[in-house]
Image (cartoon, grey):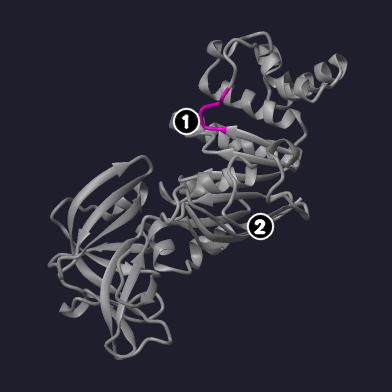
Amino acid sequence: MSVVVEKLTKRFAAGGTPAVSDVSFHAPAGAITTLLGPSGAGKSTLLRLIAGLESPDSGTLQIDGVDCTTLPVQKRGIGVVFQSYALFRHLTVRENIAFGLTIRRLSQAEADARVDEMLKLVQLEELGHRYPGQLSGGQRQRVAFARALAIRPKLLLLDEPFGALDTRVRVELREWLHELHVRTGVTTLLVTHDQEEALEISQHVVIMSEGRVAQAGSPAEIYDRPATPFVASFVGGTSVLKGHVREGRAQVGSLIVDAPESAREGEAVHAFVRPHDIKLVKTSNGHGVNGTNVLKGSNGVNVGSSGRVERLKPVGGYVKVLLKLPTGDTVTVEVPRSEFDQLGVVEGDSVQADVRTARVFVGDFSI
C-alpha cells in the first residue's frame, strides 16, 4: 500500500510561514520511507497531517489509492508510534496492547489471540503482566509498536521512535525494526533527524528543509548524488570549501577538483568533501610533490593539497583529523585506526590530502 502526498501545505497562524509548504512525494508500498531533516524542517507536522491529527490548508493525501485528505483519523487504518511511548501507566502490557482492539469491539477471545500474537512478534511473551514502569525504555517502545500493530494497520507512522533511548538501545532497536518490517511488510513512514538511522533501515528517503522537500530517493541516491547544496551539506558530515572556476576546473582554496560541465570561467563554486573521501600521506616539509601545493589523485588529475594537522580526535574505530589547508580553510578527515597507526602523524605534522571525490555546485549561496 503506497502513500501519495501532493502539494500539502500547513500553516499554524494565518499569514504565517508554513510549517509544511507544497510538499509532494510518493512512499512506495511495503517499504520504510524516512522523513529526514534538521529540527524545524516540518517532518513531524507532515507525519501528523498524514495521520489525520492535523488538517492541511491545501493539497491532497492518498493512502492505497483512496483520498484521505479529509478522512477522520480513526478511519485511515493507521498505527502511530511516538517518541514518548504514550503507554497507559495504569494498564499492564497486555492491556495496553489490547486498548485499540477494545475500542474496535473485538471479542475477548479475538483480542486475547491478537495480543498473544503481538507479544510474540515483539519478543515480550513473558512480560505481558507487567506495567510500563517495570520495563526498560527499549521494552516500552516495543510495547508501543505492538499496540500500533495490533489493529492491523495499513500504514505505520513512527515519529522519532528511538529518540528517547540511549545509543546502544537505539542501535539494537534499529536492527529489531528492520527484522520486524521484514516479517510484517507493512508500509512504514519514519521521522528522524538521525542520518545513520535513515540510511541504514530505509528503502526510500525524503530530505526536508524549511518545510519543503529538498530531495527524495533511495539512500544510495541521496548519499552519492545529492541534488542541492543543502542535501550535500546535511548528509555525510561534509566540509564545505568555496572557490571559483579556473580553466575548466573548480579551484577551492588550494584544492583543484572537477567542476560541473555547465560551469563558466570565474564562476563561484562550493565543493562538498566528505571526511572519508580524503586520503592522507605524511610529508616532511609541508609541501606537495615536487614542492607544489597540489598533488596527483588516483585518476591522474590534480585533486589534492598539502595541509597541517591541527587536531586529532580518536573516535572508536577511526580518528578524526582536523586539517588546516594553506589558505586557512579547514577540513575534517576520518581515518581508520589501522591506517592512522601506519600513517604515524601527530598534531602539527604536515600531510598531503588526496581528495578521492567531491560534489561541486555552481553558485554563491549560503548553506
Q: Is residue 7 visible?
A: yes
The quarter of the image holding the C terminus is bottom left
Which mark is first along the chain, 1 or 2? 2
**Residue at position x 79%, y 25% in the image:** 104
SS state under label 1: helix
What residue type is disc 1 on? Arg
- The x and y percentages for residue 286 are 14, 67
**Front label number (2 vs 1):** 2
What label does residue 60 carry, if any?
A: 2
Q: Which residue is mark 1?
A: 168
Q: Is residue 360 left or right of residue 217?
A: left
Identify which residue, 345 or 197, lies in the foreground.
197
Magenta-drawn stretch contains 85: yes
- Boundaries of the magenta span: 82-86
Identify which residue, 170 or 55, lies in the foreground.
55
Up the image or down, 213 lies above or below 132; here it is below
Q: Main secondary structure of the magenta part?
A: loop
**Residue at position x 28%, y 56% in the image:** 332
